[in-house]
Amino acid sequence: MSISTDSKRKQVLSGMQPTGNLHLGRYFGAIQNWVNLQESYDCIYSIVDYHAMTMPFDPRRLREQVWELVFDIMAVGVKPENIFIQSMIPEHTELAWIFNCVSSYGEVSRMTQFKDKSQQINDKDKDAFISTGLFTYPVLQAADILIYRADYVPVGKDQDQHLELTRNIANRFNQLVGKEYFVLPETLYTDLPKVLSTADPSKKMSASLGPKHHISVFSDADVIRKQIKSAVTDSGDTPVGQISPGVQNLLDMLKASGGHPEMESFREHAISGTLQYGRLKESVADVIISMTETFKQKRQEIASDKVKYQESVAASSQVIRKRAQETVREVKDLIGLMNVPL
Ligand code: TRP
């Protein structure tokens, strides 16, 4: 790739927490998009392990979870050179501190994700504590984004508030130092399916709900087929003319896996109440199995040569870190802090 084309490409950045395995919900809802964006943008993707510490976590498992997710996303097509591990770039936390001091306590207090997650912790265990890190989580996220001057951030609607905060922090900083230093990032929306649990289509597919509620993209073919076959479709209360959430979920997965010649016909039959569920499920299982075949092969290849892949992500993190270091030096300089001489 030549420098000139590179410099024209917009910078994309996104992050994901290392929790749970890569299931179809996370794949169709985010990672597939990460893979596709690599064609048109300069992309960097982070496994955000500092963020993973904001909720109750197990220090004995954190590192392993990070590597598992790194291997998983590589296996489905995220390029190793585009991946970095957040804790290998400690400048994120240094910038987050500076941002803590230029973000408004009032605004950060209004973040709804903090309220939701605090609630989750309280519901699970009355004695568990809400960490200060959970409160300042979105400030660290702002640092993740601004440190690389990202133009676009592909995230779901639930992250809107965090992106707004990020722009406000960038503006406040720019005003404070009297310079248009930070780029104001935008959310990059793509219409991605919200995949539901096949066992209970009233809930989002999620690893934390238990094995019945998510399908790993690395599952064996017979496991995938069995899970799709037992998918809840319709409890008989869907009026003619409408599609039940369970059936819509299967249609969404069919489409996201690359489609099927009978897709439109399935949809029409679903609306008129004449759908043969067995045939739809058969087709969904077929397309998912054929899509995930190469993922599984690649995942095995990575598993048999872990050190090589770990070294490659350590190397890409080091390259990406240079950019973060440069930003932090400039920021400290602009805001009146001291840099150690190089
Ligand atoms: N908060 C994001 C989420 O829950 C994860 C995240 C952390 C992130 N840092 C980021 C996303 C930077 C985009 C950019 O999905």
Image (cartoon, helix red, strand yellow):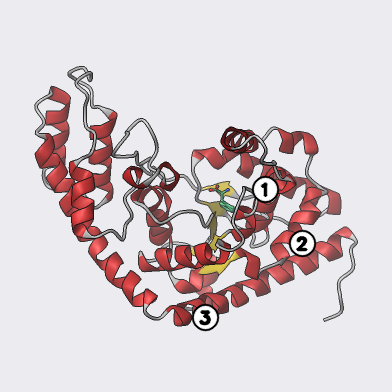
Give the CA separation, mark 2 to mark 1. 13 Å
Q: Which amino acid does label 2 sit on?
A: Glu
- Residue 66 % position (x, y): 52, 64
Of residue 111 and residue 51, the one placed in the foreground of this image is: 51
Q: Where is residue 133 in the image (x, y as percent from the top left)?
A: 71, 49
Q: Mark 1 points at which residue?
A: 137
- Which amino acid does the dot numbered 1 rest on? Tyr
- Under circle 3, the secondary element is helix
Q: Distance between the residues labelled 3 and 2?
A: 25 Å
Indicate the quadrant where residue 275 lies: top left
Q: Is the C-beta separation of discs 3 and 2 under 8 Å?
A: no
Q: Is mark 2 within 8 Å of ligand 1?
A: no
Find out if the beta carbon at label 1 lies less than 8 Å from the nearest ligand 1 atom: yes
Pointer 3: what residue?
311
Residue 244, given in percent of the width and then of the height, sits at 25, 27
Q: Earlier in the sequence, mark 2 or mark 1?
A: 2
Sequence-wise first label, 3 or 2: 2
Q: Residue at x 68, y 61 (%)?
A: 147
Task: Name the residue that disc number 2 marks.
Answer: 94
Q: Quadrant of residue 339?
A: bottom right
Where the C terminus falls, by quadrant?
A: bottom right
**Structural distance between the alpha carbons of marks 3 and 1:** 28 Å
Tag 1 secondary structure: helix
| Residue type beneath disc 3 | Glu
Q: Is residue 73 left or right of residue 149?
A: left
